[in-house]
Image (cartoon, rainbow, N blue to C red):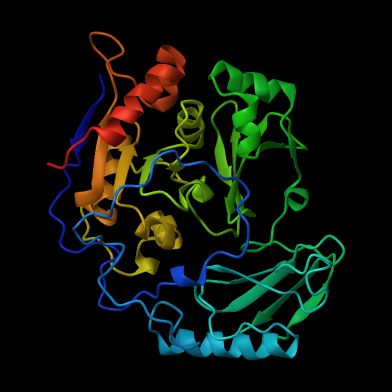
């Protein structure tokens, strides 16, 4: 039987997202870009807890002006965004009164007007520091792309060009192709089905058939890629913004599971648990003794938490299903201290034999099967009580 333990983290002086500055809420605006995948939620989410989450300060929701509504209250950043807006308006992109760095926005393309369907096909992204904005129209007959800068560099735009940057990569530009029989068999040995691989858009390099490509997507758009060989060598696509793997799967849920690797996320999905994400860069070797940083630029190892803040704000309970080794335990503690210990719970994996425990979700799936894993995770999600 699996056991939940409330995360035994060190005393928290201040959490990563606790700040005196106001974070702008844009939930009232709604999503425009359709999600690539969706789930049917069979039970309504539980009501939000009475405590205040570190990711969601108690500040009133309001729609701000274009300079204020950048989410950080910085005059310099606001000035950059204003410059970007002016330059884009000259090219026909009317961003109205909101542009938030680090997020994706969707507008009507001034070139194709959304085609016959008249939908918002222009995906626009402003990088976190406001240095430049980029866009791409995903209408097949348009594909207008471009970039403007907050400094004196000239804007450029065109049709059918390819350039790599946040949110502007594609499967073609990365040289990806569907998984071949060798890698499908590799996953089958780990009890992961081809259906699950396809739903999560797991691919391979066309130039190296033994390299797995875990595609990272946000609002259905390809924004990053992590590679893995069968021999467990890892690397990530350069110049892309770090986010949680499977981020679109936690858009509208109140409880989530965080695991240490992409294969563990796929394993939980085999057990019917799709409200799961994986960290992008593994676990630290040990818990840091330094004081928790309160500014994003000083917390590079966990920057993906900042980049996914809007999604994490909505969550009332977080199950930390990291590996059972020393590094996995360190990762769970670091995450709990940043996300708020009151809403975090730690998984203790079941015993494998008299002297050892299972290490992670994939080991449980392989040795106990999806039914056992699902029963265990259902117990974790629904039967734990706050200590």
**Residue positioned 51% across, 72% down in the render:** 29
Q: Quadrant of the N terminus?
A: top left
Q: Is residue 97 above or below residue 105?
A: below
Q: Looking at the picture, how far across and down is residue 190, in whole percent?
A: 53, 20
Front position in the image: 194 or 190: 194
**Residue positioned 30% across, 36% down in the render:** 381
Residue 142, quarter of picture = bottom right
User: Image check: 281 left or right of 5?
Assistant: right
Front position in the image: 210 or 323: 323
Q: Looking at the picture, how far across and down is residue 81, in whole percent?
A: 54, 85
Residue 206, quarter of picture = top right
Q: How many marks?
A: 0
User: Image check: 303 left or right of 145?
Assistant: left
> From where the camera sits, is residue 273 visible?
yes
Front position in the image: 239 or 323: 323
Residue 202, quarter of picture = top right
Q: Looking at the picture, how far across and down is residue 182, in whole percent?
A: 70, 21
**Most extreme residue toward the right, as rendered?**
141
């Amino acid at each position: 039987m699996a056991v939940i333990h409330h995360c035994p983290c060190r005393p928290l002086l201040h959490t990563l997202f606790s700040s005196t500055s106001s974070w702008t809420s844009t939930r009232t605006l709604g999503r425009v870009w359709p999600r690539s995948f969706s789930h049917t939620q069979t039970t309504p989410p539980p009501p939000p807890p009475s405590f205040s989450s570190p990711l969601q300060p108690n500040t009133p929701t309001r729609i701000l002006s274009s300079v204020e509504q950048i989410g950080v209250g910085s005059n310099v950043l606001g000035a950059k965004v204003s410059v970007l807006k002016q330059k884009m308006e000259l090219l026909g992109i009317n961003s109205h009164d909101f542009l938030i760095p680090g997020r994706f926005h969707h507008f009507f393309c001034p070139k194709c007007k959304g085609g016959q369907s008249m939908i918002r096909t222009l995906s626009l992204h402003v990088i976190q520091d406001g240095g430049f904005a980029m866009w791409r129209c995903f209408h097949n007959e348009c594909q207008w792309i471009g970039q403007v800068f907050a400094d004196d560099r000239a804007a450029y735009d065109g049709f059918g060009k390819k350039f790599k940057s946040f949110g502007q990569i594609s499967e073609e530009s990365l040289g990806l192709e569907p998984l071949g029989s060798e890698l499908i068999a590799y996953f089958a040995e780990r009890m992961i089905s081809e259906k699950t691989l396809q739903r999560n858009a797991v691919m391979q390099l066309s130039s190296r058939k033994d390299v797995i490509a875990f595609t990272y997507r946000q609002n259905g758009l390809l924004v990053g890629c992590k590679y893995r060989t069968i021999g467990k060598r890892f690397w990530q696509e350069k110049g892309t913004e770090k986010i949680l793997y499977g981020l679109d799967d936690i858009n509208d849920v109140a409880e989530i599971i965080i695991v240490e690797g992409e294969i563990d996320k796929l394993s939980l999905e085999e057990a019917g648990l799709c409200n799961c994400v994986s960290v992008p860069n593994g676990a630290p070797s040990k818990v840091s003794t330094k004081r928790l940083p309160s500014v994003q630029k000083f917390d590079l190892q966990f920057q993906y938490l900042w980049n996914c803040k809007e999604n994490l704000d909505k969550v009332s309970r977080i199950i930390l299903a990291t590996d059972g080794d020393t590094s996995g335990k360190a990762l769970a503690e670091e995450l709990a201290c940043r996300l708020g210990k009151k809403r975090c719970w730690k998984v203790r994996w079941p015993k494998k034999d008299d002297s050892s425990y299972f290490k992670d979700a994939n080991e449980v799936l392989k040795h106990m099967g999806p039914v056992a894993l699902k029963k265990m995770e259902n117990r974790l999600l629904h039967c734990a009580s706050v200590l």
